[in-house]
Amino acid sequence: MNEIEFQDALLKKGIQISDFQLDQFRKYYEVLISWNEKMNLTAITEKNEVYLKHFYDSISVAFFHNFSAPLKIVDVGAGAGFPSIPLKICFPNLDVTIVDSLNKRITFLNTLAAELELENVAFHHDRAELFGKNKIHREKYDIVMARAVARLPVLAELCLPLAKKDGFFIAMKGSGGQGEVTDSTKAFNILGGVVKNNYSFLLPNEESERNIIIVHKTKTTPKNYPRKPGTPNKQPL
């Protein structure tokens, strides 16, 4: 997917990006590739592949949920900034927080944000389990997001504590996402979430399966969750 195809594909979904925003994506690619030579940010480096599998794929969540309002979102384990930075470029009104356990990635994100002239972004070096216990952040976000970080029962424990009541946890998954929803019933019940929608679609050109699971936070998460670092992954709910 080249730049023109990328712009046209978004326009077909009702998302119009300006020349300035297109230039931001161009700089994003350049910074990503430059830093990727020093540290492992992505295995996908070919330009058309990055535009399809990282940029377009990240923005695809906005085909199914409204991001045009000035929402406060947190991206758990964003790595190189996916999906929240592409969303921030398309929807500048978003207030974006990213939490990641590797400090080198936080350094990259700070450099990226400066290069792209992004405002209202914050990057935190922390374990998601500890971040979710922090009173400054716990149950403060309209949307909590995660893309390809862990299985859904684990993600639910890392993410739902950060969503405010009546907010949303959105998980972006590849093939197999439907089965993970079934495996997460117990976790959602404990943590206060209810699956609102489960969308499945094919990524353009290569037609690989994607699943977007939108969970509505209907009640407060019990204060003993998330459990201590490492436990959610070792002993999923």
Image: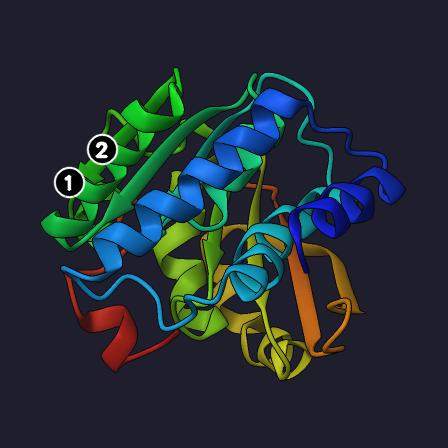
Nearest to the eye among marks 2 and 1: give it: 2
Residue 194 drawn at (x, y percent): 65, 55
| Closer to the camera in the image, 213 or 231 | 213
Q: Residue at x 41, y 51 (%)?
A: 159
> Which residue is outermost to the right?
12
- Answer above or below: position of 55 versus 143: below
Q: Residue at x 66, y 55 (%)?
A: 2
Residue 31 drawn at (x, y percent): 32, 44
Quarter-of-image position of residue 42: bottom left
Residue 33 drawn at (x, y percent): 32, 55
Badge 1: residue crowd in 10 Å (few <14, some 14–19, many ≥20): few
Residue of label 2 = 111
Horizontal side, residue 101 vs residue 91: left or right? left
| Closer to the camera in the image, 110 or 233 | 110
Instruction: Indicate the secondary structure of the residue bearing disc 2.
Output: helix
How many numbered callouts? 2
Task: Mark yes or no: residue 165 visible.
Answer: no
Q: Could you say which disc has been placed on residue 107 in the image? A: 1
- Answer above or below: position of 177 versus 67: below
Q: Residue at x 73, y 33 (%)?
A: 66
- Answer above or below: position of 214 versus 137: below
Instruction: Indicate the secondary structure of the residue bearing disc 1.
Output: helix
For the C terminus, the image quarter is bottom left
Task: Mark yes or no: residue 22 visible.
Answer: yes
Q: Residue at x 78, y 33 (%)?
A: 15
Verify CB contact (< 8 Å) between mark 2 and mark 1. Answer: yes
Going by the numbered disc 1, the residue's amino acid type is Thr
Going by the numbered disc 2, the residue's amino acid type is Thr
